[in-house]
Every structure is written in structure tokens, then in C-alpha cells.
Image: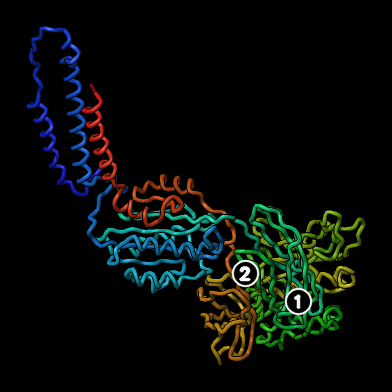
Amino acid sequence: MQFVQPLFLIAFVALAIPVIIHLFNFRKYKKVYFTNVRFLQQIQQETKKQSQLKQRLVLLARMLAISALVLAFSQPYLPFSPVRENRSDKRFVGIYIDNSYSMEAVETQGKLIDLAKTRALEIASAYHATDLFQLQTNDFEGRHQRPVNRDEFGKLVDEVRLSPVTRTLPEIISRQNDLLQEYRSMNRDAYLISDFQKSTMSLQNITPDSSTHWFLLPLPADKRNNLYIDSAWFISPVHQPGQAVQLKVRIRNDGSEPLEKIPVKLTINKVQKAIGSFAAEPHSATEIILPYTENPAGIQFGKIEIADYPIVYDDHYYFSYALLPSIPVLCIHEKNDNKYLNALFGNDSAFTFTNSLAQQFDHSTIPANALIILDGIPEPSSGLTQSLLRFTKNGGTLVVFPPEKGNPEGYRTFFDELNTFGYAQTDTTQQRVSYINLEQEVFSNIFLKNAAGKTILPENVDLPVVFKHYVIPSGTKSDLEVLMRLQNNDPFLVAATLEKGNIYFFTVPLSDTWSNFAHHLIFLPTLYNIALLSNRLQPLSFPVGENSMIEIPLDPESEKNRIKITNNETNFEMAPEVKKSGYRSTLYTQGQIGQDGPYSVKNGKKTIAGLAFNYNRKESEMNCFSDGELQNFIKKIAVAEMRILQPKKISVSQQIEQIRQGTPLWKLFVVLALLFLAAEIALLRFLK
């Protein structure tokens, strides 16, 4: 217990007054002589012991009454803080308002974001107008780094809006610590107003400044229900104009109630392509398939929509991808065109097929292709090898058919890049292909699937016959994935990933003297699927507010104009950082994309790519820390100056007043003084 006016305690000397009165006011008994017993009825019967007890009780009541009055005038209080502060000093007050999208949730007084702003103003009203205030939100804006007075603080709070940016609790406290460091000479209070989501507000690695008073103000929503679109992807990576495709969408129900017949809509380039409905169990994910037919070639901007309330920012999902009119395929050969490859790709409108002699090959045409086939070149030149390796590392696909004659050691450089063994000696033993890796994408749609949805190889299937083949030694050094294997376990077709691209090595040339593969039924789907898979899509979407790294094909006219990213639905425009490497350009957004939606990458007036951005779904999980969990957290970090405010019991301003002044006890002592005086009167009047 501490005192506002401790000098009044000197008045305790007044306790001597009733003691002195008591000592000098003793009653002395006198003897009375009488001759008649009738006077006995008029004598008050009182023993000396009874008189002393009454006087002492009266004395005690008077002393207690005076003591209570002295304590009341000294204004005692119970401090909330273990350290008493100078009440006349100016204070520095830092207030964090969680303005993430989860604050769209509602409680009885409205949306949490509006309630948070109200609480921040209540906190400010509990301080003096001359105190300094500093606002902090998830945006970490520069204008919030300057301390302001109370009126200016109110204007800043009114301007707070929901933001896609999410921050963890360690980030927020670290930022608050940095802002408070400049004002160490002042008494400092820091308030954190949030719903304290578990997905973002981790309670680990927290280091609050021990010289600052910390206050947590949780704002729980009445109902923590949320239905949102988590992600979307295509079942098949192959896309062609006019082709039927299936888009799979994952939707999560973060609520406690089951949902049925919820509509979902898909639009492509603002034209409705598919509609559907789904049911979702509580706290679970549901996956639905939306089939549709591809548009003509061009950039496709898609949007998936559902309806939910009150959290609506995650009820739509944007995506974008490029649909090429045809897939460019280049075949580099030694002398003559390969008739089997010409028959496969030359007459198919899905491909743009080009043949080129190795001696007359123009290296500048490499970036324009998705798939390059090396057909039987005895010894690729070092220039061609390096160009093809650069092409593969930047996302291209390379298929190698070894030469019928010559030294296959010419391909050593390719294998060295893969840190694996290359072509070795020739095995002239006749073999048959006995194994196909059905888990690989190349063979995913060639064979039928069983009832469980697993691809199976038919019994007694007729597979290619190999008369002779090159051997690729196996060992611990090998990083190759075997797609097809011969009866003696030698590889027939192997695949490897080289940075962003893929290389497929066959161990036989496309020659009838080496195998019947070119005449076999599996030849067409194998090469066809490799070609289709070479047209890889970039990610369907990117997260808002992050420094996304986006790769696009190198535009030959990019030197003339500065590349810009523009929002297709607003006037927003930004110039990303651009780095050119090989045959591609890499764009860095530097976190400048702050709104979801469809975006276009433009070089001048020319649109060279389409992008889509979506808000981070971390805020969609409405699982928040309870007051008990926050209390346990405070105990673990052992910070004496951190506590939780409970606005439902008393107002925030009243709690702050109690924290700053403690719990006043003067009213209690006034009541006690009155009670002791009443006890004195009762003793004098009723105790006989």
C-alpha cells in the first residue's frame, strides 16, 4: 500500500487525544449512607470491572475512528505496478492496432477493426493531452514513426484501414522496442490490440523491453467461422486451345458448423466457364473439380468465387496462365530429317515443328522453343552444348537420341552437368523393355487406371524390342530417374532435372537397326507427352505484399521500354526490378503489390505476360489464443510489466486509470471511520 499524501500520516499523533481524555476522566465511586432500603431501587448497579470494559471499548472505537480518518486524508492506494512512477512526468504511449484481414470478424459491437480503433482512442483519452503517442499497424508506415499529440493520434487512428500485410508477434514487439528506445528517459507504455491469431501471432522468441509497461488487449470475435478458397491447380499441366481441362479447387471450412450446397463460380477473361456447389464439414477442407473448355490462344485471367460473411477478402481466388497456339519444337540432326519425328510433330497443329542441321544451326533461335531434340549427332560442338545447357537451365526441355555411329563421349558434358555417368559401351544383346515407371508424368495418361485410380500395366503387354543399346552405368553417383528399363535392368529411357529444365536420354537411336521403338505404339504417346509437358506453366498466382520472383520469357524489345506491372481492374502501376539471365527475365516486385487481382506485364503498350496475385491465407484461420493461453505466455517470459486488459469488466480508460494510480482506498477508510464513530455512540448509549 502506498500514499498519495503521506505527510497526513503525521496526524496519527491525534491518537493521544482520546487517551488523555480517558486518563483524566476516570469515575470515582462515592459512599452513600442511607437509612431506608427503599433507596436501593434508585441506585444504579455497576461494578468497577464492567465500567472499565466499557471505557476501554469506547477508547478503542475513538482511536480507530481517528486512525481511519488520518488514513483517508493520506489517500492510500494499492499500486498495480511494482515500481512507483512520477505522476507529473510526460509519458510515451505506443499503441499497435492489428489491421489484418482477420479483423473483419464481428462481435456484438461491430467489426473487430472498428472496435480496435475505438479501444485505441479510449486508451489515448486516459492520458494527458501533453503526452506523446505513436501508432503502429501491420503496414509499418513511415508516417507512424513520428510521435504525435493526442489530437493528431486520433486522426491517424481514423485513417487506419484493413491491410493484406500480416505480422508475427515477435516482429511487432521488436518494432515497438525499436520505436521506444529513443524515449528511455520517459515513462513508457505499449499496447497491443489484436485478435491474437495462432497462425500469425506466435508466442515464441518474444523479447519485450523490460523497462516498458506492456498491455495486451485481445478482441475475440463472437463467432470464429470462415469459409475460404485455399488454393487451385490444374489436374493436368498440358493446355491447348479448345481442349477440355479440369481445375481443382480446395475450399476450407474453418467454422464449427457443416455447410451444404454452397455455390462456386469460375470465370475466365470475365466470361463464366463453370458453376458448381459443394458441402463442407466443420474444420476441414473440401476439393471440387471445375471442368471447362479452353479459350483460343492468349493470356487467360481466371477468377473463382464463393459467398461468405463477414470475412470476405478470401472468398475469391485469382489465377492466370498463358495459352500458346502451338508448342514450338526444334529438331537438330546431322544429315537428313528424321521421318518418324516429322510424322509425329510435322502434321500436328498443336506443334510448330522445325528441323535444322547441326552445321547450319542458328543459336539465336533456341529461346523461341519449348522442346529441342538432338537426333543422332555424333559429337555436339562445345558451342551447341553450352547453348543447350543454358536453354535447359532456364526451363527448356531437351531430348537426346544418341548417334548410330561415332563417339557417344561427345555427350559427356551433359552428364557431367548432372553429376552422373554418361554413355558407355554398346551392348549387342537383344532385350525387351520390361519396366515402365507409371508414376512419371510422361506415362500418366497412356494406360488405364484401376478402380482405386492407380495406373496399371496390362498383362502380357507388348513392349518395344531392343537389338542393341548404349549402356549407362548405374551407381551411387547417378542422379537419373529411370523411366523405362530393359530386361537386364539397363536403362532404356532416363530423365534428369537440370535447374529449371529437364533432359531425357534414350539409350538407342531412332533407327530400325537398334530397336523397333519408332514403330511401336508407345513411341507416339511418349514423345507426344514429353513435348506437351515441355510447355510448363508459371505459378498460377503469387502472394500479395511479398517480394515475388517472377520469371517471364525474354522479350527482344525489352530494351526499348521499361517493363511495368499494371492492375487490369485499377489504375495501379509499378516498375519491378528486372534481371536478365540466359533466355529469361526475372521480375522482383519488392512487396509493392498491395491488392489482389489480375495483372499484366507490359513492355510499353505491348502485353508480354499475365499475372495473378492473391492475399495470404494465413489470416483465414480463425483460431485465436485464449486469455488463459496469453496468461501462461506472460508467466513463461517472466516480464513483470506485462498484463492483459479485460474491457468487458470495466472500461479500458478505467483500467488504465487504476494502473496509473492504483486502487484508491480512501473511500474505504472514510466508511470505516463512520462505522467506528457509530460503534462509539452505540457503546455509550446501549451498553449498561
Looking at the image, which is closer to me, 342 or 335?
342
Q: Nearer the viewer, mark 2 or mark 1?
A: 1
- Residue 430: x and y, percent? 87, 62
The colour mode here is: rainbow
Look at the numbered disc 2 and give the secondary structure of its residue.
loop
Q: Is residue 510 left or right of residue 56?
A: right
* Residue position marked by numbered label 1 in the rendering: 272
* Residue position marked by numbered label 2 in the rendering: 499
Q: Is residue 443 left or right of residue 635?
A: right
Give the residue displayed 27% in from the left and 58% down from the top: 187
Query: Which amino acid type is shown beneath numbered disc 1?
Result: Gln
Q: CA distance from mark 2 to mark 1?
A: 38 Å
When asked about the image quadrant of residue 440, the answer is bottom right
Looking at the image, which is closer to me, 572 or 154?
154
Q: Is residue 331 above or below residue 246?
A: below
Classify 10 Å Cα crowding around label 1: few (below 14), some (14-19), many (20 and above): some
Question: Of marks 2 and 1, which one's residue comes earlier in the chain?
Answer: 1
Give the residue displayed 28% in from the left and 45% down from the top: 667
Q: Quadrant of the N terminus?
A: top left
Classify 10 Å Cα crowding around label 2: few (below 14), some (14-19), many (20 and above): few
- Residue 298: x and y, percent? 72, 83
Query: Which amino acid type is shown beneath numbered disc 2?
Result: Glu
Look at the numbered disc 1 and give the secondary structure of its residue.
strand
- Residue 271: x and y, percent? 74, 79
